[in-house]
């Protein structure tokens, strides 16, 4: 099927015919009995992996299985912050690979993912914060990742809503700013990858839950049992976020993961007042304004493991306390919605993108509280790993063995949430 | 917010407690393989179902105890002391 291309001109022309001539963006195929590869999990990471398998590795006889609807898990539940100012060399390479892919993703997919590099500013409130931020800035510069130090006055100039007075519990002592960081439209990322992958022949199968893994006598993957029947395949890539432990146990693979609810909330929509993304790991506040006008606020994880996609209200209250101190102008705003997503957290707060002990089974997991930013880069190197049966140089260090060999990539201090 | 039964203080709000993660993890002897040691340090069951975990009534009596909690319903099926064996959970609750 030849795909319509999206452009301002096509929008205008189809508007003349009352937008009645748009095609569907992806098919609703029934599962075939066999595929060359199957991705389990139809979030941004899984759909992206399918797209790159088709576009860069010539594997078009593949499917994405999603137990619910695509983009309905953490892809649709996060606060869309994009940045790459991570401390260690391995992380900087992985996350900056992703930021570079974000920059022209809309053109590559012919889908407006609304990537907006409006700058991500991370606040420092204590001497320790300042030292940690400076260390990150220097490490980032060595790795070619932009990051700069701002005084409180410069931070306020960049974000006029910020309270830099000394009348709050944790006054702002400075900030680290990554200007290439920003936000994107979460749904559009899933839809854009789905549409582009579908155009290359990838079957995107929703409402299809994996219930078992079929192994051949050698132990290698031979297929999947699903709620829509058996599917034979020699390669399975699991990209199931908070449910990864459950899916991988079907193949008897244990992973160093724990699943926690991570909450977020949005306010009523208002006129544009907030030009950037502000994060504070110390007082636990993450905020930006969507193009629709809502303040998008990230809260923390609950303290216990859960698969419920909801969390306790006091977690949100804690974040709103911090938001009201840092941005007094928001004190009388009303919050419209809150929700939770289940994030799979590794002990070192770095992801796993790797082969597993089971031949033909690959896993992309452990993104914890910060997976959205990595969607294109993660999908890109995961596709490489599946297609070539070996990791891309960028994800080689993000293996499972590091938790037995002690080669941890300890990014807890750089992750979006204080631990 | 959950109400959690402290074995000493009775039912209290969740935010008086700290969750200490999976319980009944036995420290292996020091002369073991890297795989065994890695499993002890980092690999957890992460069940979608009943999870046996440690809690501490930090902003209360300060005591540690064990709880059996369902990770889908958040129902607490049993609360027992640190030195107690795992209770029989087959009698009730939404465990599956």
Image (cartoon, coloured by chain):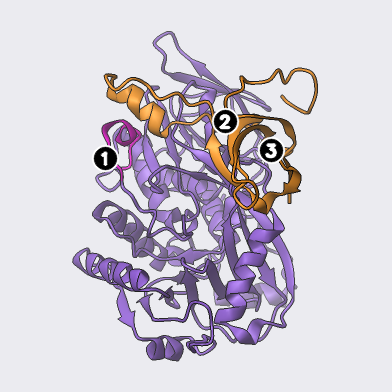
**On what subunit does the disc labeled 2 rest?**
A
Quarter of the image where one finds residue A308? top right
Both labels 1 and 3 in a single chain: yes
C-beta proximity under 8 Å, tags 1 and 3: no
| Residue numbers of the magenta segment | A398-408
Q: Mark 3 points at which residue?
A: A207
Residue A228 placed where, x, y %? 68, 27
Q: How far apart are marks 2 and 3 (CA)?
A: 17 Å
Q: Which of marks 1 and 2 is nearer the N terminus?
A: 2
Q: Which residue is drawn at 48% across and 37% down?
A: A257
Q: Chain A is drawn in which colour?
A: purple
| Visual hue assigned to chain B | orange
Disc 1 versus disc 2: nearer the observer:
1
Relative to B66, residue A416 above or below: below
| 10 Å crowding of disc 2: few (<14), some (14-19), many (20+) | some
How crowded is the residue under tag 3: few (<14 C-alpha within 10 Å), some, or many (20+)? Answer: some
Q: Which of B85 and A86 is in front in this view?
A: B85
Badge 1 crowding class, 10 Å Cα cut-off, few under 14, some 14 to 19, many 20 or more, is some
**Mark 1 = which residue?**
A407
Q: Where is residue A146 in the image (x, y as percent from the top left)?
A: 29, 72
Q: Residue A162 appears at what percent x and percent y?
A: 51, 85
Q: Mark 2 points at which residue?
A: A246
Residue drawn at point x = 55 percent, y = 67 percent: A6
Main SS class of the magenta portion in the image: loop
Q: For the view shown, which residue lies furthest in the right direction?
A: B92
């Amino acid at each position: 099927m030849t795909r319509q291309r999206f452009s301002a001109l096509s929008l205008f022309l189809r508007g003349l015919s009352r937008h009645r001539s748009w095609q569907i963006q992806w098919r609703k195929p029934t599962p075939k009995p066999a595929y060359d590869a199957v991705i389990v999990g139809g979030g941004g990471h899984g759909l992206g992996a399918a797209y790159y398998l088709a576009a860069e590795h010539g594997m078009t006889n593949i499917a994405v299985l999603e137990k619910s609807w695509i983009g309905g898990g953490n892809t649709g539940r996060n606060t869309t912050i994009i940045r790459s100012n991570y401390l260690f060399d391995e992380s900087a390479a992985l996350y900056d690979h992703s930021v570079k892919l974000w920059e022209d993703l809309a053109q590559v997919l012919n889908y407006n993912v609304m990537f907006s590099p409006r700058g991500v500013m991370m606040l420092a409130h204590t001497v320790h914060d300042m030292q940690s931020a400076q260390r990150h800035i220097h490490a980032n510069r060595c790795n070619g990742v932009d990051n700069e130090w701002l005084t409180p006055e410069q931070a306020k100039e960049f974000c006029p809503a910020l309270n830099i007075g000394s009348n709050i519990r944790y006054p702002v002592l400075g900030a680290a700013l990554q200007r290439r960081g920003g936000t994107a439209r979460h749904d559009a990322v899933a839809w854009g990858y789905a549409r582009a992958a579908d155009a290359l022949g990838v079957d995107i199968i929703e409402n299809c839950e994996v219930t078992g893994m079929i192994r051949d006598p050698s132990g290698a993957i031979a297929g999947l049992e699903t709620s829509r029947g058996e599917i034979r395949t020699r390669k399975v890539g699991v990209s199931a976020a908070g449910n990864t432990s459950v899916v991988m146990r079907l193949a008897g693979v244990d992973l160093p993961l724990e699943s926690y609810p991570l909450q977020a909330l949005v306010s009523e929509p208002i006129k544009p007042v907030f030009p950037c993304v502000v994060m504070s790991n110390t007082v636990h506040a993450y905020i930006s304004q969507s193009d629709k006008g809502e303040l998008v606020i990230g809260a923390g994880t609950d303290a216990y493991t859960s698969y419920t996609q909801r969390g306790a209200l006091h977690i949100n209250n804690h974040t709103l306390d911090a938001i009201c101190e840092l941005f007094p102008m928001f004190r009388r705003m009303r919050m419209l919605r809150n929700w939770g997503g289940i994030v799979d957290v590794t002990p070192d707060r770095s992801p796993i993108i790797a082969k597993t002990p089971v031949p033909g089974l690959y896993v992309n997991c452990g993104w914890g509280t910060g997976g959205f930013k990595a969607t294109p880069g993660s999908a890109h190197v995961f596709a490489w790993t599946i297609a070539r049966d070996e990791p891309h140089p960028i994800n080689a260090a993000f293996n499972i063995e590091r938790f037995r060999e002690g080669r941890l990539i300890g990014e807890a201090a750089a992750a979006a949430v204080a631990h | 917010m959950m109400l959690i039964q402290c074995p000493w203080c009775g039912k209290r709000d969740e935010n008086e407690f700290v969750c200490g993660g999976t319980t009944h993890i036995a420290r292996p002897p020091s002369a073991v393989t890297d795989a065994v040691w890695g499993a002890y340090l980092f690999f957890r069951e992460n069940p979608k179902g009943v999870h046996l975990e440690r809690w501490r009534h930090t902003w209360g009596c300060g005591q540690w105890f064990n709880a059996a909690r369902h990770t889908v319903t958040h129902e607490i099926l049993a609360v027992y002391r640190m030195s107690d064996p795992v209770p029989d959970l087959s009698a009730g609750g939404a465990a599956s």
